[in-house]
Amino acid sequence: MTAFGRTRTATQAAAREPTSPPAWLPSRGRRSFCCRPCTPSSSPPPPEGIRTVVKVLRAKSRQKGEPCGEPLTDHLENTLLAASAIRRRIGRVPNTPPAFWTWVELAALLHDTGKLSTGFQRMINNTDENATPWGERHETLSLGFVDLLLDHLPADDVMWVAALVAAHHRPFTGTSGARKAPLFHLYEGDGPADFLAKFAPADQDRLTELMEWLHTTSRRYDLPTEPSAPRPDIETLTRSAYQLFERLHDRWSLDASGAAEGRTAVLLLGALTMADHLSSGHRSLDIQHPLTPGYPAQLERRLATEGAELRPQQRYAAEARGHLLLRSWTGSGKTEAALLWSVAQMTDLAAASGGTPRVFYLLPYLTSINATADRLTEEFGTEEGIGVLHSKAASYHLAHALADECASHEGADDEERVDAATKAHARALATKDFRELFRVGTPYQLLRGALAGATHSGILTDSANSVFILDELHAYDARRLGMILAMMRFWSELGGRIAVMSATLPTALQEFVYDVLGRNNVTLVEPPPTAHAPRRHILHTRQRHLTDPASVEEIAERLTEGRSVLVVANNVRHAIALYEALAPICESLHGKHSAFLLHSRFRRSHRNGIEKAIHDRFGTGKLRRAGLLVGTQALEVSLDLDMDLCHTSAADLEALLQRIGRVNRLGHRQPAPVIFHHPDYATRPGSGDTVWADGVYAAEPTQLAWSLLTGHEGDAIDERAITQWLDTVYRSRWGDTWRSDVEHHLNHFTQHFLTFRYPFDDRSQLTESFDAQFEGVEAILETDRDDYADALALADGAPGRLLASDYLIPMPYWGTKLPRWDKRLRVRVVDGEYHPAHGLISVRRDHSSAYRLGELV
């Protein structure tokens, strides 16, 4: 194959080095604007005769505010430039063929060439005729360009490029219930004459000039192509498309691929769809990392100004190479240790791959994600460089934008709110399109990559050669934990480096991490035996329930002493009852707005305000103030609080450790009392004879925790002993069942989602069930319908829906079938009783009966 006078194959082309430095180095610019036409300085200009194609052929219809649709050649070149930018960012992908990126770049240049057809141009209103539906798939006709322009490449190269071009919108195969007809189903049984009838006519001059432009552009970007541009007519083009389609059909319609081939297919498709989305959206990729090689020195300088220095476990983490297990108590600098470790891994990965490693900081809960993003923004001194990756990311950005503009959501006028919502949506969309190099989010957003296909494969490709920090891994149930562990192994095979950190990491979970990452590849870092472990809590137990009148009286006495008191119930009904009993007492002693209730059943706007008020009064580092905070398990994962004492219903040990972590958080005071109350055990609908602690927590681990707690009555809790307590729980019969469940889900997810035996098969039918495992159901109140509609009408599309989301309330799992679907507003609506201070109190199934929260759990 001749290019610039040399004979080359795709593999030889793949060996060329990027023209810009791939290393993880500081840069003057923040973003790589990869979606603008540009010409390499050494490249010849396009031939003078190529004019009609650039002026006439369009890639898409005219968008609002544009004089005309984007020229087809602009889109193709922009997609090629985006693919090259992605190549420089990701670098060499482990365990993939050497020609990987050359295949991606060729597919990027050729993927939409089938839009040449007059039928497509008419459909987007780019002809003198009225716009009419076309009914054909342009990517199928694009195969003709692949076949003719790459005719002298090895057959394997041509087939990989063809597969990417053909699959960049639709799967090849799928069930009859697929949302979109798979590509093979659309053209099975067709012959050359059918292809000609479906894809003709096409203007001959434009076809000739497009071929010439593609050939010239390939040479300009040093891609392998024919010695001279082919000059086919439309019949030749459609015949070539048919022949290549048949070869693809024979290869991918029935036969399963091997693990390596299937993974290569998915990663290739992900790279192309990433490039296509960047080009279509005219988006950019950050090139300057917020976490720089200078971070260790910066951290040491900051600590020195505070009269401190790096702790031993932080130094150990900074020196570790490979995967990391970091176990250290709350307030011991785990976040800084993980960042120091990340700097070392990024340096190694950049040298090995030639790319710029991304960092993913993954946590289980939205509130902790938002708090971590805020903290890192302050730590790195940049807001733009930190991406927030969860399902409510746009709401996070909206809250920040409104706070910056007017200090409160209610203080903004409609114009300000619409402007803020538009910017917030754009920011969240940029993160979904992989803009930032450092992202804070949930593992779920990365697990979605396992759904593969044109929609999700880019998530997998972007994860190659990346650094992953997983905080609080123990917080996931067995199913989700198994899925995450399987994904950790997959990331490792793609060159990733993984850190797992926690204050409470049981040995059983530690062994799972060793199993999926390789024991010899993981460094365990803990504080040295000589380090002083804080004793932050004194343990007490009560046989009476948390809602017992005597318990309420005891809590009230603590309020009279001027304490800040945390009360955590196991369900919403108990939390509301305790708040109603204690809030008047607290406010009579300490003033209005000294008592708070927090659970998960508030309108989004109300919850944001409540969380801010709680943080302002009880946040770590704030001036100590008396008051009351009552809540549910939502407080286990909520704000960074530092309170004087805690009363809580007993639950499983890990949940309890999270709850009391909000008391004497930094250990700067004398050990604070934490009082555990015996729960009620009862069955719940649908669970047979199984009993649950207060209807929520599994009985056996709760009973095991209670046995441990009562054995340490009156003791100051030694945080080094926590792991031993957890290991006692996990050595039980319940622990055996837990291990079996985790292993089952790990193997199931690996086998069904990560082997990619049919990489171009439709998986859309799995999306809904997959999402249901991670996202709950939200609804608005019947009484909020008009307000929701008004907010929705403030702005078109996603910004309007973002503003209206203030009225959404998460539904309890038992109530997911209670809301009705409003087709006009496209939202679930529920008839319920709601109070701004109490949240959702009850949900009515019909006009004659109602659920009180907590009755069905």
Image (cartoon, rainbow, N blue to C red):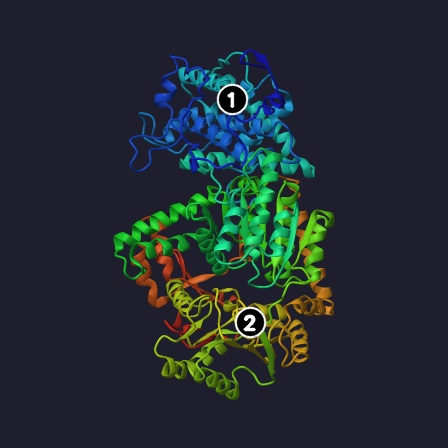
Front residue of 317/576: it is 317
Provide residue 508's location: percent of width, then percent of height: 71, 61
Q: Nearer the viewer, mark 1 or mark 2?
A: 2
Residue in the picture at 36% in, 17% down: 51
Three-letter code for the amino acid on which mark 1 is drawn: Phe
Front residue of 185/827: it is 827
Q: Secondary structure at mark 1?
A: helix
Query: Dot 1 corresponds to which residue?
Result: 145
Three-letter code for the amino acid on which mark 2 is drawn: Ile
Q: Is residue 522 left or right of residue 16?
A: right
Front residue of 386/720: it is 720
Q: Quadrant of residue 459?
A: top right
- Is residue 449 shown above or below 563? above
Residue 765 visible in the picture: no
- Is residue 315 shown above or below 456? below
Q: Is residue 115 left or right of residue 149?
A: left
Query: How would you rate the neighbour count of disc 1 (Cα within 10 Å): few for under 14, some for 14-19, many for 20 or more?
Result: many
Residue in the picture at 30% in, 38% down: 64
Among numbered discs 1 and 2, the one appearing first in the sequence:
1
**Label 1 to label 2, Cα distance in Å?**
65 Å
Quadrant containing the N terminus in the rendered view: top right
Label annotation for residue 660: 2
Residue in the picture at 66% in, 58% down: 526
Q: Is residue 713 left or right of residue 64?
A: right
Residue in the picture at 68% in, 78% down: 707
Provide residue 181's location: percent of width, then percent of height: 52, 40
Quadrant containing the C terminus in the rendered view: bottom right
Provide residue 224's location: percent of width, then percent of height: 56, 19
